[in-house]
Image (tube, helix red, strand yellow):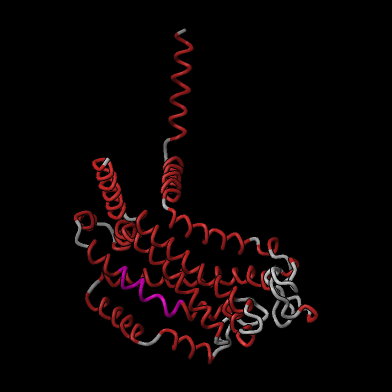
Amino acid sequence: MAKNVTDEETRAERREELIRGRPYEILRALRSALREIVSDRVGLFGVGVVGALVILAIFAPLIAPKDPAAQDLTDALKPPFWYADGDFANALGTDSLGRDILSRMIYGTRITILVGVSVVAVSGAFGTVMGLIAGYKGGRTDSIIMRVVDTQVAFPGLLLALVILAVIQPSATTVIVVLALNGWMVYARMTRGVVLSVRETPYVDAAEIVGCKPKRIIFRHILPNLTSPLLTLAVLEFARIILAESALSFLGLGIQPPQVSWGLMIAQGKDYLFSAWWLVTFPGVAISLTVLGVNLLASWLRVVADPQEREKRFAQSSTHQTGAGTGT
């Protein structure tokens, strides 16, 4: 009997050891985030839109019914399937060259994700580093960096992008570089503001007294405080980049054929707006839904990643429940 009890205690201790540590903490955080996103319908819509975009971008060759570049002039300007002349072979119709609209929209998702993620990664990394240096160093370094930021912010970003892309050859790579060049300033400003407020906290002073190097203080003690605002800002910037890339492609200075972009599709279909409305409408709806979903996701992330916002929401829900209970 005593042996069975000992074996049970040993197994229980092993189970506790298995669930301890970082993997369990990550799993618990994921479960908590899943519960919160399920309870927040608005945020769930945003996550659903972004998740659908990622799936379409990754599995585009498997999901798209046709080759987006395949032309068939006999099927040119075929309407969507619910029209008498339409069929399910081209569910959303075709363009002036007989290319399938649905397939082109699915492949256009790849460009959207590629440009958005790349620009956010490049501009976010560079802007965050500049903001950390400006906020922590202060003095002349801070003045120089912030004057550069102020000068570039004063110049219209879209106009600068148009000028640069008019001089060099437009492509996906040049669009990413130009949009990253126009977007790093917001990260630098926000990072500098947070660093200035965190720099005077006791734990940073203690790290300096102990003798920690500035690099360790910046990246080990200050940078973690930027996780919540940087995450929210990055998602919001992703939505802005989608609109900027679509605008540049519409003007002919962004993504170039044979690559597919939602903005390029609108540009190619604008001449058929009244005779073939689906050439412009479906890509426009895709852009609108994507931007809406990303903005809703950013709003949800702002609440989830910021402890103060979570406390506010918890207090509001508690007050509402108390008021409802008193009323009944």
Query: In the shown orientation, is residue 325 left or right of residue 114?
Result: left
Q: At 47% across and 7% down in the image, what residue appears?
A: 1
Residue 102 sits inside the magenta stretch: no
Residue 165, how many percent across, how many down?
52, 87
Residue 77, how many percent across, how many down?
72, 80
Front-lying residue, 293 or 115 = 293
Front-lying residue, 69 or 227 = 69
Total label count? 0
Q: At 23% across and 57% down in the image, what residue appears?
A: 204
Query: In the shown orientation, is residue 223 left or right of residue 76?
Result: left
Q: In the displayed image of the protein, which residue is found farthest to the right?
A: 74
Residue 149, how many percent across, how many down?
33, 80
| Image quadrant in which you'd find residue 128 | bottom left
Query: In the shown orientation, is residue 80 left or right of residue 250?
Result: right
Image quadrant where one finds the C terminus? top left
Q: At 75% across and 67% down in the image, what residue appears?
A: 89
Picture layout, residue 21 above or below residue 303: above
Q: Is the magenta stretch mostly helix, strand or loop?
A: helix
Magenta stretch in the rendered image: 180-191
Q: At 43% across and 30% down in the image, what residue appears?
A: 16
